[in-house]
Amino acid sequence: MNVDYYTLENDVASGIFRHRLEEELTSGFRDILHSGERLPPASHYASRIAQIVSAGSTTPFPPEFAFHLYQEILAACEHARAAVLGEEPS
């Protein structure tokens, strides 16, 4: 997923970031599942994605925004994983 760091804060606040990430994750999770692999917990993916997004920023995120960003990433991972597995998101 391409992250536009100039609009990231607004994209997170509006839900656009979460929606786009969830769409990409759903597709990717289906591919993983169809290859015969098990899907790790959503928190595993969320922490890795948050690290990647944070590393791409030229400046550190304020702690409150970093927390909110992680929560949005985690929710996207949970919903995408649940959709692929036919479960209710946690």
Image: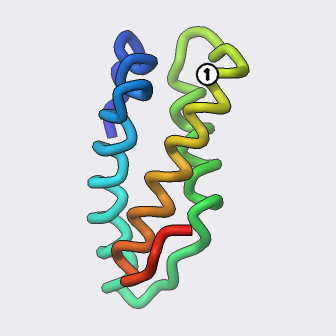
Viewer-side residue, 14 vs 34? 14
Q: Position of residue 7 (x, y in %)?
A: 35, 15
**For the point 61% across and 70% down, which residue is it?**
41
Viewer-side residue, 29 vs 22? 22
Q: Position of residue 26 (x, y in %)?
A: 32, 64
Secondary structure beneath dot 1 equals helix
The residue sitting at the right extreme is 63
> What residue did someone put label 1 on?
65
Q: Position of residue 43 (x, y in %)?
A: 64, 59
**For the point 36% across and 58% down, which residue is it?**
25
- In the shown orientation, is residue 74 left or right of residue 84? right
Residue type highlighted by circle 1:
Phe
For the C terminus, the quadrant is bottom right
Viewer-side residue, 82 vs 55? 82
**For the point 47% across and 85% down, which residue is it?**
37
- In the shown orientation, is residue 69 left or right of residue 88? right
- In the shown orientation, is residue 61 left or right of residue 58? right
Q: Position of residue 39 (x, y in %)?
A: 51, 77
